[in-house]
Amino acid sequence: QRAENGDFNWIIPNKFIAFSGPHSRSKIENGYPHHAPEAYFPYFRQHKVTTIIRLNKKLYDAKRFTDAGFEHFDLFFADGSTPSDTIVKRFLNICENAEGVIAVHCKAGLGRTGTLIACYIMKHYRMTAAETIAWIRINRPGSVIGPQQHFLMDKQAELWTEGDIFRAKLKRNHKIAVTRILSGVDDISINNTRNRRTIQKDIELYSDDDETNCLTQGDKLRALKSKRQAKAPTASPLAWLLAMLVSTLCSIVIWWIVCGSLLPSLLFCLDGLRT
């Protein structure tokens, strides 16, 4: 989670990673480390990440990910805002058809990123909006901000219904496949994967022009996170020595109490047994 290590967290094991948006090159800006796409390649490959979804303005060339063998999608919506139904549907469709782990980022990897991952969790795990927000914040503190919380509460019933339909369809397709196999049909091919080229041809409804170089909510969130990590208490040698002295003193006091009160009683009992 630490910024110098890439500032990313697992939200769903083997399914979703939320991370802070990469930059065109690795650098430290206002005390916060930014990483180029290549900095993530070793970890992503090791953990079977296949798909990158960018939700913020373009701060790096997507070709750097695609040339390295990753799929890359852009679903921009404004910093601190909520996604349109079109964005939500495209996000869910991409995630439902991705074969490996999906890494999602916006600018700070908190608000927009947490909101869309929450939509997936509510649809496929039937968790309430409150439960989902709590789970994501446990894994990545600071996720889902302001109006995004109310957005998820409003979307809960709709996403639950979509999830029920999705699971019923999968179950129905499974039964059909089994029936055909038992009937001797061995050329069944069930493939719900949507061609990436088709997705890329979808009309781009949003522009990232309004996410300018001014200080955005994402910048402020990253700055706060960096400050908190910088102020995290570390055990100095003096503090460690003081803790050891206090522990030793407590042990001596306890031993003195035992020797002063319990030991005479035990000796008296032993003398009584001897007589």
Image (cartoon, rainbow, N blue to C red):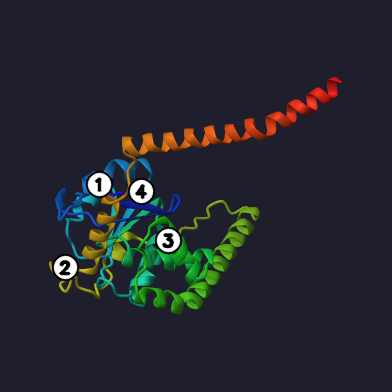
Say which element carries label 2.
loop
Q: In this rendering, is residue 31 above or below 133?
A: above
Asked if the residues shown at circle 4 and circle 2 are in contact, with their CB atoms under 8 angstroms apart, the answer is no
Q: CA distance from mark 4 to mark 1?
A: 20 Å
Q: Residue at x 50, y 66 (%)?
A: 131
For disc 3, the neighbor class at 10 Å (few under 14, some 14 to 19, many from 20) is many
Identified by mark 2, the residue type is Leu
Is residue 96 something one can see in this rendering? Answer: no
Q: Which mark is residue 4?
A: 1
Question: First in sequence: mark 4 or mark 2?
Answer: 4
Separation of marks 4 and 2 at Cα, in angstroms: 30 Å
Residue 20 percent across, percent down from the top left = 27, 56
- Figure label count: 4
Q: Which residue is mark 3?
A: 136
Quarter of the image with the C terminus in it: top right
Which is more N-terminal, label 1 or label 4? 1
Is 212 left or right of 160, judged from the image as shown?
left
CA separation in Å, label 1 and label 3:
21 Å
Q: Residue furthest right?
A: 275
